[in-house]
Amino acid sequence: MLEVGRHGVQATVTDVSAQHRNLAEFTTLRLGGPARNLTVCRTTEELIATVTGADRAGEPILLIGGGSNLVIGDDGFPGTAVLVATDGIEFGADETGPHVTAAAGVNWDRLVAETVENGFGGLECLSGIPGAAGTTPVQNVGAYGVEVAQALRGVQLLDRRTGEIAWHAPEDLGLAYRTSRLKGRDDEVVLAVSFRLGDGGRSAPIRYRELAAALGVAEGESADAALVRAQVLKLRRGKGMVLDDADHDTWSAGSFFTNPIVAAGELPQILDRIRARLGDEVRIPQFPADGGTKLSAGWLIERAGFVKGFPGPQAPARLSTKHTLALTNRGAARTADLIELAARVRDGVRAEFGVSLHPEPVFVGCALPA
């Protein structure tokens, strides 16, 4: 694994900012005010030195990887923004099989592409997801029937409270649907991640119906990993979920709300309410999950009257024209515009169906109103 020593770090950290660097250019939403200072860390040693130095000085820091899961307020951040641009990918193998280890700042899709190009499977269904490799276990990133938790081998963390640097097993991270014990806290910093892989160029079993149909395979079968990656990228592009500077539908944080998981005791009442609104014959997407039933947030949003492109072409922030689960910046939005739209959608779904939607991104210097 990529190992980092605890002592004797000599860092040369490049300060790329004059003061008041706008953070919007470092998030996929292109939203966010200025930071007091901004620093880029290109090696793991620089990252450790920057974080520990800031902690000794009492300087607040905001760690930014790919910026794909961040909503930063219009007032920005009253401290130093640290851009995690660390690099390095290593392939290896042990008694359990092949694996890959990457520094936290490695572009996630580059990592997936390199695994496929080197003849390995396991991560291909997670192709096209924006952001840095180190952020993927934080929210247990998932798509097309696969979650990071299924392939994760370990995460190297810097404990800001003790200065300890250690590898942690997946079972120690509290991984669950779109979350972990690392999400929403900053006392531990991801330095590197490692993933188990399959050899022979075959994918993980295809468990997502839409993807299986597009590939022409049965659910549960595997396929050529390169073909799966190509098909996932095609499906994601059709939904505006692959970054494209020219396409404002991709100026988003991806899926803004997580799919709600309803407890067994609440489900009959909610399903009855949905049918009362939409008719008894409506087919409600629902899946067993974490001891409850998962409903489709995008389906609920659209059936509550929030169609693609809502609230209209003149709005600075609106739902994607390709996918109702993505809230987008049309080029002139402020964070306040996005939050107003998110609250409107959330409140509308709750009023219509009695289902509470919860945002997936991390908010910095801002929040959805209660």
Image: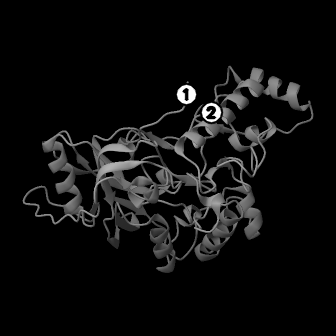
Q: Give the amino acid at mark 2.
A: Ala
Seen at 28% across and 55% down, the residue is 19
The reply to whether callout 2 and callout 1 are in contact (CB within 8 Å) is yes
What colouring does the structure picture have? one colour
Query: How far from the left and from the top, in percent, is residue 74?
Result: 46, 43
Q: Secondary structure at mark 1?
A: loop
The quarter of the rendered structure image containing the C terminus is top right
Task: Please state the total of marks drawn on the protein image.
Answer: 2
Q: Is residue 175 left or right of residue 357?
A: left
The foreground one among 225 and 21 is 21
Seen at 62% across and 69% down, the residue is 246
Q: Give the amino acid at mark 1.
A: Pro
Query: How far from the left and from the top, in percent, is residue 184?
Result: 40, 38
When asked about the image quadrant of residue 277, the answer is top right
In this rendering, the answer to whether 268 lies above or below 129 is: above
Q: Residues within 10 Å of mark 1 (few under 14, many from 20)?
A: few
The foreground one among 177 and 62 is 62
Question: In this figure, which residue is indicated by the disc labeled 1?
Answer: 369
The foreground one among 13 and 125 is 13
Can the viewer see residue 169? no
Question: In this figure, which residue is indicated by the disc labeled 2?
Answer: 343
In this rendering, the answer to whether 310 lies above or below 304 is: below
Seen at 17% across and 56% down, the residue is 49
Can the viewer see residue 259? yes
In this rendering, the answer to whether 64 lies above or below 43 is: above
In this rendering, the answer to whether 235 lies above or below 149 is: below
The foreground one among 107 and 64 is 64
